Each structure stands twice: as structure tokens, then as C-alpha cells.
Image (cartoon, rainbow, N blue to C red):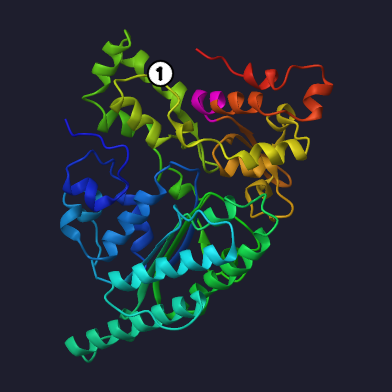
Amino acid sequence: MKNIDTSTFDFPGIIANDFLYVDKTSYVWNLVCPKKGEYFLSRPRRFGKSLLVSTLKTIFQGRRELFKGLAIDKMDYDWKTYPVIHLDFSDAGVDSVGELNDQLSSMLEDAADENTISLRGKGVAIQFKNLVNDLAKRAKQELLAKDPAKKIDDAQVVILVDEYDKPILSNVDNPKASNLLKVLKQFYSVIKKCEGKVRFAFITGVSKFAHVSLFSDLNNLTDITLKTDYAGMLGFSEAEIRRYFADRIPLAAAANGLADEELMARLLKWYDGYRFSKAETHVCNPVSVSKFFFNDYDFANYWDSTGMPSFLLKVARDQDYDYEAALTRFYDESVFSAYELDRLDITGLLWQTGYLTIKEVRREDEGLQYRLDFPDKEVQATFTEKVIEFPCGRKTRRRGVQPCAAIENRHPQG
């Protein structure tokens, strides 16, 4: 029985320490197999984005030995090595342009050090561009030294950006947020400007902001957020839980006084229900499931441990948001699209941050229509508790209902 680590999102660390790893490398192979790819993926917090980025980084570093026995090791892949620029914004807690520039500069310095190259130029956008160009140039020189007939296209770099939107989400209610957007717009535009030197780019985040270059200047990115082929790439399916936690399911059942199938039914009720495409594919929150098996098989709210972003509730209150109506109507695909910082759509925000998910899809003359609802009991409980603590909109109160009681009683709580 392999140990479970609920706090490590570093692929080499998980493998080296023989922790349990749910193999997602068949999905990753689909991303890395083409000779060139530039992608964007949005998923809620605590859904395995950082582990996916770490896995991609390890692949492009050519560390095949760490993938022994995994799906990608059996597939046709060349395992070439590339310089990797890994920018991790997960700790980018900034609230001013100066702090953001310092954070960006620090990340670029780390990326340069990791690739044993000096960072040059003034201004983070120029430094980023120079770093890409210098790494590609050095890679070309190294390849030509080994084989003068080597194709120039092989001298490229890989760019991985994790939680690109953290500086924005942390400042939604900051009057100076637009200034942060300008810095990020210029910074991210480097990826498009250096497109010819980029073998692979992968950007993750929770949200999609139209004014960030990822969705204006960076029109070369393929958005796989709603792609059926990648609906199960993050999160644990029921089949994966039955396979990878098979030795723990009987122990969990006994600890809760349940039969194995009763245990699975309750587990899915608590943590299953996320759906990221028109397909029926649905997955559980991976951190919640892992913590359930790690924490003595206790059914508890693990997803909420990092707290609900207060700006969500503030925006909902300011917009007089009608929660009850939002969970019964159908939306077109624009609800999932990029949104403007000065015109936030609370339904889209709740979907992107994981409080709502696709529950029903129907085809109409005007195209696909989606109904959204809570993914599972864990998220519903989190949302209800936070909304009750925070004053709800006037529309709920006008109907003579206690704050969000209709939401609290929307689903059975068994």
C-alpha cells in the first residue's frame, strides 16, 4: 500500500518517494506528442494543476526514468530535452505594480538560474523575451555542435505558467487592478512574440480574463478547458478511485460501518460531480479524495481549507445576485468565456472557481445550452455556509426567504 501525500504537487518528488500517483500521463501524451503545441487550461483551485505542470516539466527535461511503468512510457514519444521556463504564480500575493514587477523579476531570475544562464535587460517583459531568445540560441549552438545538420526547429524552449491569474484574483476589488493587468498583458505577450522559438507552452489558471494577453494578443493558444478529450485529465474518476485506492476502500468502509459499495456511494456523493465538457465525464476533487483516505476515512469538508475568495461574495452582493434562479436556468457557452475585470459575471466566476459545474447539457436551435449547479455535497456545504455568513442579495430577501435557505435545502444532505 503506497503512502498518500496530500501536500506534494511536485511530480519528481512523488515518484522518488514512492507516493501514490494516479496515472494521467496518457492525457499528457496527447499534449506533448505534436511537434508544437500552445495550450490554456482553466480548472478550479486544488484540482491538480500544479502537479500537471510539474509532470510536463519533467517530461520536457527528458527524465524518462521517472515515468517507468506509467502510460506515457509505453507510448511513442521521442523524450528530447528542452530548456524549460517554469513560472509559478501560486504564491504571487501582490497588490501593487511595484510588487508585481518584483515578483516577475524574481521568477525570471529563478528560471535563468535553473537553466544556468544570465538574465539580461531592463524591465520584466524585455528580460522574459531575452531569456527565451538566449535559451533558444544556446540550445541551437549545442545541437549544431553535436550534429551540424540538425534542424533549427529543434532549438526551442518550453514555457510553463502555473496560476497565471493569481495576481488578478487577489486584486479584483483593488481600484488599481487595471494597472496590474497592463503589466501582465505586456509580460504575457512575449510568448506570442517569441512563438517561433517555443516548442511548447502551457498556461493554467482558475479564470479567463479578456484583457490579459492570453486571450487577446495570445490568440495562438488552444483553449482545452471544455474539450471532451481532456475532461478527465484532472480530478479522479470513479474508476480511478476503485483502481488506485482499492486496498483502502474496505478499510474506509469498515471505519464508517458501511459495505464497500455503500462507502463508494457516499464518497461520490461527497466529492464527485465535476463536469468540464458536454460529455458525461465527471470527476472528483483529487485533493478531497486523497485527504479522505489520508485522514482516517473521515467524511469532511477538505476543499474549503484554503477559504472561499471573499471577492466572490462581495461581487454577488453588489450585483444583487439571484442564486436560486441561477441554478435553474440554462446558459449558452458564453458563460464559460473570458470576462472583463470591470464587468464581472458572478455565474461565470462561480463556475471557474469550482462552486458550480455543468449538470445538464441540451441541444437547442441556437446551440448547446448548459445548466449549472453545485458539484457535490462538499462544495454545496462550503457555499451555503459562506453565503449565510455573508449578507445575501435583496432578491433572495424580497421573496421572504431566510438568507439563502433555498440554496441550503436544495439537495439532500445524507
Q: Is residue 141 shown to the viewer in this render?
A: yes
Percent from the top left, x then y, of residue 169? 58, 51
**Measuring 81% from the left and 28% from the top, which residue is drawn there?**
395
**Would you place residue 315 above or below residue 86 in this image?**
above
**Measuring 75% from the left and 31% from the top, which residue is drawn there?**
322
Percent from the top left, x then y, of residue 212? 61, 64
Percent from the top left, x then y, of residue 248? 24, 23
**Along the viewing direction, whichever of 278 and 387 lies nearer the viewer:** 387
Tally the numbered discs.
Answer: 1
Percent from the top left, x then y, of residue 321? 75, 35
**Quadrant housing the N terminus:** top left
What residue does disc 1 label? 265
Residue located farthest toward the right when viewing the structure as drawn: 398
**Measuring 42% from the left and 22% from the top, which residue is drawn there?**
300
Is residue 376 a member of the stretch shown in magenta? yes
How many C-alpha atoms fall within 10 Å of the one at disc 1: few (<14), some, or many (≥20)?
A: few
The image quadrant of residue 247 is top left
Q: Is residue 36 shown to the viewer in this render?
A: no
Quick check: 400 left or right of 386? Answer: right
Name the magenta segment's main secondary structure: helix
Is residue 250 a member of the stretch shown in magenta? no
Q: Which residues are magenta?
A: 375-381
Q: Secondary structure at mark 1?
A: helix
Quick check: 240 left or right of 403? Answer: left
Residue located farthest toward the bottom when viewing the structure as drawn: 148
**Would you place residue 26 above or below residue 38 in this image?**
above
The image quadrant of residue 35 is bottom left
**Along the viewing direction, whichever of 349 and 103 lies nearer the viewer:** 103
